[in-house]
Amino acid sequence: MTLLVHSAFKLKPILPQQRLIKLPTNQLKKTTLVKPVQQLNSKMSTVLFQTNLVKQSMSTSNSVKNNTEIRKTTLIYLTAISAGILLISNLAATKLWDMFGIAVDGGVICFPISYILGDIIIEFYGKKTAKSVILSSLLLNILAAIVFWIVCILPPFTGTEEMHTAISSVLGFAPRIIIGSLAGYLFSQFSNNFIFEKIKKKTGSRLFLVRALGSSLIAHLLDTLVFETIAFLGVLPFNDFLNQAIFAYLIGLGFEFILSPIELLIVSKVRPYLDDSEIKNPGSKSETQNKATSKDSESKTQKEN
């Protein structure tokens, strides 16, 4: 077996006029060319490793940037939906519907969704962001109540009196319903976030449904007590008020239990995009792999030398 070694010993293309030296393998080991070749191979390995490290760093940086944009966009949607759910619940609460002879306000149908949204927000964005979302939803609904009140007190155009009466009956809200709804929203959402955060400190990212449903049990209870007391105590006979409050609590909690598998599915699907662990510690996994590769490269170089 013979090896071809370039006589000029430089990394240049072999041209026709340049000579090649044919050396047997046993003689090649004795020449002074072996060590420089090994050193050159070592340097090339180092360059390739560093190039690969730069590529991985750029890839990690792009991934973190994309996740950050997704988190911002998703938070905007979650905030808008949370505010919308509260507004819709307030409008729907003006309608009392008959459930087996018991009056139940219409807001109980969609209001439990606010707890699901709150759980998702505090899970991926933290308590501080969740608090900001609650307050922004509250301010939007206060603004809506003021605008609706102004619209209702404006004099109707001739011939639209019946329409004016119908609109006023829906948009006018009873002051007690507005106050009760906003107060219940504040108490329940803040308590939901507080309990959710306390459970999360013990469970970590595991057992999401335990945190979600456990916090909702207390939050629903507080919301029902505050809202029903302010909005309907004294308006309805006491027995009807008590039955309505109990059914409102059970129905709202039942809706969340029914929707809990969907909530869990949503959380599992969005976690890779909304979890901020990769943003806080970018490339931690790749760094570990790079360190191992670096050690292998160094040990290989030492053996060659």
Image (tube, rainbow, N blue to C red):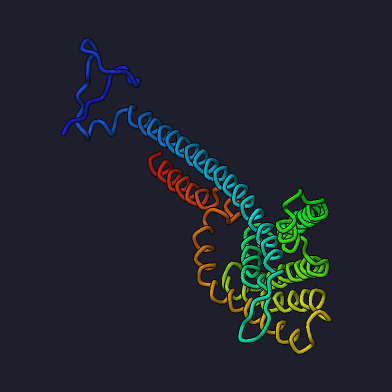
Is 193 left or right of 44, judged from the image as shown? Answer: right
At 62% from the left and 82% from the top, the residue drawn is 99
Q: Residue at x 68, y 75 (%)?
A: 96
**Rendered location of residue 29, percent (x, y):** 28, 34
Q: Is residue 215 visible?
A: no
Outermost bottom residue: 239
Q: Residue furthest left?
A: 1
- Where is 169 relative to 55, above or below? below
Q: 178 above or below 83?
A: below
State the residue at coordinates (22%, 35%).
26
Between 304 and 297, the one nearer to me in the picture: 297
Residue 239 at x, y percent in the picture? 76, 89
**Count of picture labels:** 0
Q: Which residue is found at the position 53% from the left and 40% from the top?
A: 62
Q: Is residue 226 above or below residue 288?
A: below
Q: Is residue 274 above or below residue 112?
A: above
Q: Where, by quadrant of the figure, is residue 124 drawn? A: bottom right
Residue 264 appears left or right of 5: right
Q: Is residue 242 visible?
A: yes
Residue 232 falls in image quadrant: bottom right
Quadrant where the N terminus is found in the figure: top left
Quadrant housing the C terminus: top left
Return the x and y of residue 147 as percentages of the image width and height.
79, 52
Q: Is residue 68 left or right of residue 131?
A: left
State the residue in front, 122 or 116: 116
